[in-house]
Image: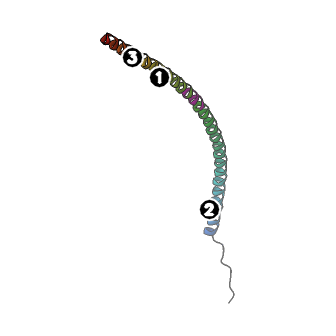
Amino acid sequence: MTAMAPEKTRTDERLDDVKEKVDGGFEKVDAAFARVDARFGKVDEKIDGKVSELRGEMKAGFDRFDAKMDAGFAKVDADIREVRTSVNQLTWGLLVAALGIIGTMIGINAS
């Protein structure tokens, strides 16, 4: 008995056609995904650029804010020093006046 190769049937041909169409479809999908990946790469680059730009703008803004705050605090410190000086002068003036009054009272009572 000799083994014979099975004959190719119409169903086999149709399956081969379906396989080719499916393979072709997957190739198209793969190509489309490659294009999408490339576009996402460009979008990522744009976003990275914008984020870097935004970071730079924010840093510059914070630097300006820090400078304004430092200047404001320096002014407040100067104002506080001025008030302290005035309070010290007032304290010494009141002390001298009090001593003068006490001295006068002692002088009046002694006479």
Q: Neighbour class for label 1 at 10 Å: few (<14), some, many (≥20)?
A: few
Q: Relative to 81, is 56 above or below?
A: below
Pick the residue in front: 97 or 75.
Answer: 97
Read off the magenta span. Answer: 63-69
Which residue matches tag 3?
Answer: 99
Tag 1's secondary structure? helix
Query: In the drawing, does residue 38 fall left or right of residue 76?
Result: right
Q: Is residue 66 magenta?
A: yes
Q: Residue furthest left?
A: 109
Spatial distance from mark 1 to mark 3, Cα to Cα? 22 Å
- Please state which of the two labelled residues, at mark 1 or mark 3, is closer to the viewer: 3
Tag 3's secondary structure? helix
Q: Quadrant of residue 49?
A: top right
Magenta residues: mostly which secondary structure? helix
Specify the amino acid type for callout 2: Val
Specify the amino acid type for callout 1: Arg
Choose the circle earlier in sequence order: 2 or 1: 2
Q: Residue at x 65, y 44 (%)?
A: 39
- Please state which of the two labelled residues, at mark 2 or mark 1, is closer to the viewer: 1
Q: Quadrant of the N terminus?
A: bottom right
